[in-house]
Image (cartoon, rainbow, N blue to C red):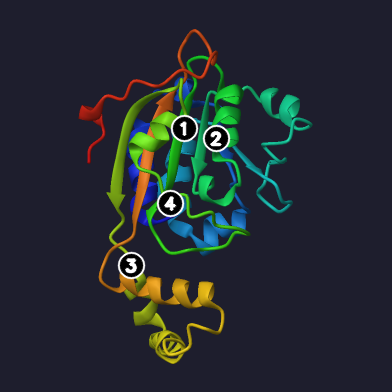
Amino acid sequence: MFEAEASWLERLLRERAPDELSPLLNVGSSTSAFREKEQPWTERLLYAPLRARGIRLIHLDAREGKGIDIRADILSEAYLPRIRALRPKAILCCNILEHVDDPDALARRCIEIVGPGGFIFVTVPFSYPHHRDPIDTLFRPTPEALALLFRPAFMLRGEIVDVGESYRGQVKRRPWILFRHIFRFPFPFIGFEGWKRSMTKLHWLFNNYRITGAVFQVPAEGPGARRAAVVDTANLGI
């Protein structure tokens, strides 16, 4: 998660009263070391302000580790009763959709967990290089595509956010990584897919990374038939 992404989420979360959000389930949370040391801005800009407002955070991940409150595969039916028993009113689903084979199934599961009236806060890369964790399907949706994915939940806000960072930052910290691209350029026949990813990455030397962010609310009548969502394009912010 980028700093600008964490700030964007916190601003939207602040628009909701604590009793509309708590408990808040953070799906794919990783460990406290990741949140506080590897990406300390997420703790400072997002999680700490939520706790200060009295919002209970529940960190969920498929792995075990310190700071993970519940270890569960959110897509597994076996874990669903345990997750629903937490009665979360809102979900953070950040930078996960590109790492699952079936994003539609993940969207359905989020709707099922929060239930009628619940909120789902979503971020996913829009313009960003291939990155394995452990896979990257290169799912890079627009807000409109997310609106269709999360139907019948209604999109309250959706926009493409320029995070103000790019591959230039990595090159500035480790300038020698440019030699990887230079040395690899003449040899596309030695692993073409890897060569293509390497060359494509140079696009972000000149263009910032961007994410798609959206906030959804499940209709009060409940997550029934998966009818097409009505998107208020005036709220898309793009």
Q: 63 or 74, which lies in front?
A: 74
Looking at the picture, which amino acid does disc 1 mark?
A: Leu
Circle nearer the viewer, 1 or 3: 1
Q: Amino acid at mark 2?
A: Asp
The earlier-in-sequence mark between 2 and 3 is 2
Label located before the other in sequence (3 or 4): 4
Q: Is the Cβ of the residue at disc 2 closer than 8 Å to that at disc 1?
A: yes
Task: Give how far across and how far down residue 174 sits, in percent.
Answer: 42, 84
Q: Nearer the viewer, mark 2 or mark 4?
A: 2
Q: Estimate the spatial distance between the alpha carbons at disc 2 and disc 1, rounded to whole Å.
A: 6 Å
Q: Which mark is residue 104?
A: 2
Nearest to the observer: residue 112 or residue 139: 139
Residue lying furthest right in this view?
78
Q: Which mark is residue 149?
A: 1
Position of the N terminus, as image quadrant, is bottom left
Seen at 61% across and 29% down, the residue is: 109
Residue 87 placement, left or right of 192: right
The residue that label 3 is drawn on is: 166
Tell me the quarter of the picture where residue 25 sits: top right
Res. 33 in view:
yes
Q: Which residue is identified by label 4?
A: 44
